Amino acid sequence: RTKFSGSESFLDLLQRVKGSTMDAFEHQVCPVEQILEGLNIERKVNQNPLYDVMVVLQNADITLQHEPVEQGVEIQSYHVGADISQVDLLVNFTEEAVGIRAEFQYDADLFRAEWMETFVRHFENLLQAVVADPSQSLYAIPVLTKEEQQTIASFEKAAVAANGHRVADRYMQLLPLAVRGNLYTRAAESEQW
């Protein structure tokens, strides 16, 4: 878990995550059962007791040799097409020869396919913005597509024209903090929307 205010840069956040990850590696030998017992967490069959979202980076060479280990025994990789997600959201990154592949697995009881498609699109926008300028403030990173930004901007204009700033301010409170920060930054820069 990482707390951040949004005013720091992506690079600052990355350094903080790196530090907490390295700390976690120092304590990786502690069995999960011991952690759960120490935290007095009740285990449920249908819920992970520690986290709901998991991010995995597969960066080790896990290529299996297709050579017999013993007479009559052969090891091969096998992909299990699991229809059931072990967590609410799993993002699995795998290093490949020309880049990194991302696979998203989610609990279909919690998320609709359309929502996940939007999530992936927003994630791509975030990655493109961070690659373009990793020193920008987290609040300034555009997550929405241009079309989504235009839709929100037109809604804001209509709401302000009809009811003043009360409706617009209430709507902004419903948005995620990163989106709100991005829109407030744009509003401050331009009086036209």
Image (cartoon, rainbow, N blue to C red):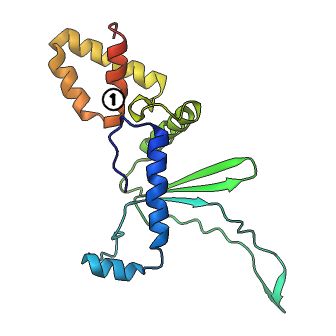
At x 50%, y 64%, the residue is 83
Residue 6 lies left or right of residue 136; in this view the side is left
> In terms of depth relative to the viewer, which is nearer, 61 or 20?
20
Q: Is residue 126 above or below residue 34?
A: above
In percent of width and height, residue 153 lies at 35, 17
Q: Quadrant of residue 80?
A: bottom right
Q: Residues within 10 Å of mark 1 (few under 14, many from 20)?
A: many
- The disc labelled 1 sits on which kind of residue? Gly
* Position of the C terminus by quadrant: top left
At x 38%, y 20%, the residue is 151
Residue 60 lies left or right of residue 40; in this view the side is right
> In terms of depth relative to the viewer, which is nearer, 19 or 187?
19
Residue 118 lies left or right of residue 70; in this view the side is left
In percent of width and height, residue 85 lies at 46, 63
Q: Is residue 173 above or below residue 91?
A: above
At x 37%, y 57%, the residue is 1
For disc 1, the marked residue is: 181
Element at badge 1? helix
